[in-house]
Image (cartoon, rainbow, N blue to C red):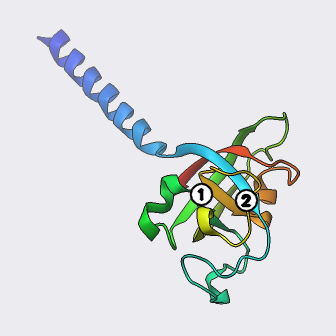
Amino acid sequence: MHKVQLFSQSLFVILAVLIYLSQLSRADVGTSAHYRTPYLPTACYGNNAAQFPSSNLFASAGEGIWDNGAACGRQYLVRCISAAHPRTCIPGQTIQIRIVDRALSSVSRPSRHGATIVLSKTAFGMIAKPSASCINIEFQQV
């Protein structure tokens, strides 16, 4: 009887730990390119310059997260996880960006088409070497 009770308690603890760990990482993996000025007008807010955060950490949404415009205003934590060339990512850097445009229709063309998130030049340069055209990212909606 004691062994069954001990086994049940151990199983419960293991299950609780697994549930906790599964909730820690809800991030997705995708690709990121960058784009530069002109940024206006945007698909989300037109010619309103107030849409851009003062930090210049903003992005255009690729088709995978555009969601018929529902992505406008969403914020994501983004970090570089790898690239075609070694040492492209800036280790330990995570940024928070705001979606202000749709990559497919942005005035400025991205450095690579088909990216999940197209970061402003400032945002891209904070997580990777600016000379890269595309990186692999981990991103999570805030």
For marks 2 and 1 on the same chain, the one whose residue lies earlier in the sequence: 1
Q: Classify residue 34 by image quadrant.
A: bottom right
Q: Quadrant of the N terminus?
A: top left
59 or 27: nearer the viewer = 59
The residue under the point 83% across, 42% down is 88
Q: Is residue 50 left or right of residue 86?
A: left
> What crowding class fits label 1: few (fewer than 14 Cα within 10 Å), some (14-19), or many (20 or more)?
some
Q: Is residue 43 left or right of residue 15?
A: right
Label 1 element class: strand
Query: Could you tell me residue 52's position as x and y percent?
Result: 66, 80
Query: Could you tell me residue 132's position as x and y percent?
Result: 83, 47
Type of amino acid under label 2: Pro
Query: Could you tell me residue 42's position as x and y percent?
Result: 61, 78
Q: Is residue 65 left or right of residue 53?
A: left
30 or 53: nearer the viewer = 30
The residue under the point 59% across, 51% down is 116
Residue under circle 1? 77
Vertical order, 69 against 110 (above or below)? below
Query: Could you tell me residue 119's position as x and y percent?
Result: 70, 61
Label 2 element class: loop
37 or 83: nearer the viewer = 37
Residue under circle 2? 110
Type of amino acid under label 1: Leu
Vertical order, 98 against 129 (above or below)? below
